Amino acid sequence: MATSFNWSDILDRAGLADPFAPDTSRRAGRAAFRKLVPIMESSAPPVSDVNDLSVPGPAGEIPARLYTPDDALDAMTVFYHGGGYAFGDLESHHRVAQRLCAGSRSRVLAVDYRLAPEHPFPAAWEDAIAALDWAASEAPGKLAVAGDSAGGGLAACVAQARRDKIDFQLLIYPLLQLAETRKVKPKMLQGHMLSARALDWIREAYCGDCDPMDPRLSPLFADDLAGLPAAYIAAAELDPLLDEGRAYRDRLLAAGVAVDYRLAKGLPHGFFNLTRVARGAEAQCDAAAAALHRALTS
């Protein structure tokens, strides 16, 4: 059974460095993301097939992984992992992608986009668009985008850029802007993974000297949201990104976009990766997968 979650305690017990700490190397931080998976996540339900492949991108082939469920729908969901644009990969989010696949019965294409700081903005956005375009050409049925945290921001950006191709967007506690990273952090958020320090680090690593208001980086500030696909926003109550998720919900609704907004009370940012250690996380993940299924069968 899942127990209460404290990010610092989990890292200490596992003997791992905080990926966002200033003295943690990129190599150690990325290794920590992968090593935390069996500690923090329960096993995902089985699916029919999992295949590694690559898709064409602007700087060469983009590694990807295709999940195929039993009794698959005529649909594909392109999934972008979280990790602050600098961490995460196909392995760190393998169970998340497989859980979405099993619960939605959609094929899921997980995308291993280029990471910062080696590949700053707009590298991740370019790879995200390229993967969506490939999926649209290969999957004649319904098409959705999904992502968590920074990957949720990428999913929102892709939905804006390719709104004519996409039927649904699943945004999981999305990082929707990097213009303002010095967020008020109430005491209830202490001990969770996403801090003001981490957001500053993400902005410097990925954005650097670019314009943080660019909608390819901060989709919250896009001028035109009309005609976007319906959205499901999975929000975490203990999340410094909570307010921007609500703001995006309100802007989408004002533009006439259907939004199903679900607040996971008592859960922190990152709960899709915390199904073993955070009470209620698995049920919230399953609810999001069910919403994706409903959208792709309606």
Image: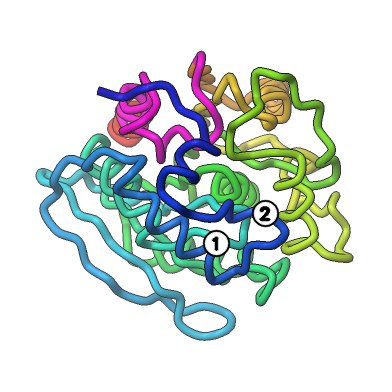
Query: Does the image show residue 117?
Result: yes
| Secondary structure of the residue carrying numbered label 1 | helix
Percent position of residue 75, x then y: 29, 48
- Left or right: 50 as drawn, with respect to 185: left
The image quadrant where one finds the N terminus is: top left
Give the residue type that dot 1 points to: Gly
Mark 1: few/some/many CA within 10 Å (<14, 14-19, 20+) = many
Check if residue 274 falls in the magenta segment: yes
Depth order, front residue of 210/83: 83
Residue 42, by quadrant, is top left
| Secondary structure of the residue carrying numbered label 2 | loop
- Segment colored magenta: 265-289
Query: Mark 2 or mark 1, which has the lower sequence index?
Result: 2
The residue to which callout 1 is attached is 29
Give the residue type that dot 2 points to: Ala
Compared with 166, 261 (above or below) is above
The residue drawn where x is 49% and y is 22% is 267
The residue to which callout 2 is attached is 21
Percent position of residue 126, x then y: 62, 68
Percent position of residue 290, x then y: 30, 27
Compared with 77, 132 (above or below) is below
Compared with 256, 31 (above or below) is below
